[in-house]
């Protein structure tokens, strides 16, 4: 069995029980949240504090918007061969007051989705290399 690795190190973590959590940043000065964290300073124009704390973001949210992707992404982005269409969701995290994009979990019927629907975070395989199974966070109906 090949080892698993995240598609982007530091964006999310998988726990031993199989659940997943996004890792973002929170400014202790103004309380603003960011995902992905990427920078170590607050990007709130009214703040600019020098440090962000690593925080786990909410794993449940509300479907804000969604779409059905029917075209393979261009290089250098990975795509399965043959390409399989997938859905993309924008999920609002209430506590953080932010929207996080992610693919929809396999088997999600985009036609059955509606704005305001409860969603939860999960992780699935994105693609496989000779050395590892690359994983990514996704959203599924709660």
Image (cartoon, grey):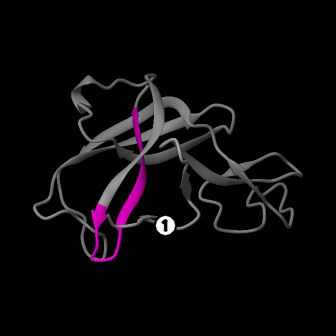
Q: Residue furthest front?
A: 1
| Residue 126 image point, x, y percent | 32, 58
Front-lying residue, 118 or 114 = 118
Front-lying residue, 50 or 136 = 136
Query: On the image, which quarter does residue 110 sit in?
Result: top left
- Residue at the image position 86 percent from the left and 62 percent from the top: 49
- Residue at the image position 26 percent from the left and 41 percent from the top: 106
Q: Secondary structure at mark 1?
A: loop
- Where the C terminus falls, by quadrant? top left
- Residue at the image position 69 percent from the left and 68 percent from the top: 39
Q: Residues within 10 Å of mark 1 (few under 14, many from 20)?
A: few
Q: Is residue 4 left or right of residue 46?
A: left
Instruction: Tell whether position 61 is magenta.
Output: no
Span shown in magenta: 127-140
- Residue at the image position 56 percent from the left and 54 percent from the top: 13
From the image, tell me which residue sits under label 1. Answer: 8
Whether residue 24 is situated above or below residue 120 in the rendered picture: below
Whether residue 128 is situated above or below residue 46 in the rendered picture: below
Query: On the image, which quarter does residue 108 sit in?
Result: top left
Q: Is residue 95 left or right of residue 99?
A: right
């Amino acid at each position: 069995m090949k080892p698993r690795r995240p598609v982007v190190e530091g964006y999310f973590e998988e726990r031993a029980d199989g659940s997943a959590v996004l890792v973002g940043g929170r400014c202790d000065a103004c309380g603003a949240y960011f995902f992905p964290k990427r920078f170590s300073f607050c990007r709130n124009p009214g703040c600019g504090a020098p440090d962000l704390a690593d925080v786990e973001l909410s794993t449940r949210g509300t479907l804000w918007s969604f779409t059905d992707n029917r075209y393979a992404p261009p290089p250098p982005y990975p795509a399965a061969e043959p390409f399989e269409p997938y859905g993309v969701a924008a999920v609002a995290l209430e506590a953080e007051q932010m929207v996080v994009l992610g693919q929809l979990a396999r088997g999600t019927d985009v036609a059955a989705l509606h704005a305001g629907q409860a969603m939860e975070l999960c992780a699935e395989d994105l693609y496989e290399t000779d050395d590892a199974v690359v994983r990514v966070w996704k959203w599924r109906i709660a």
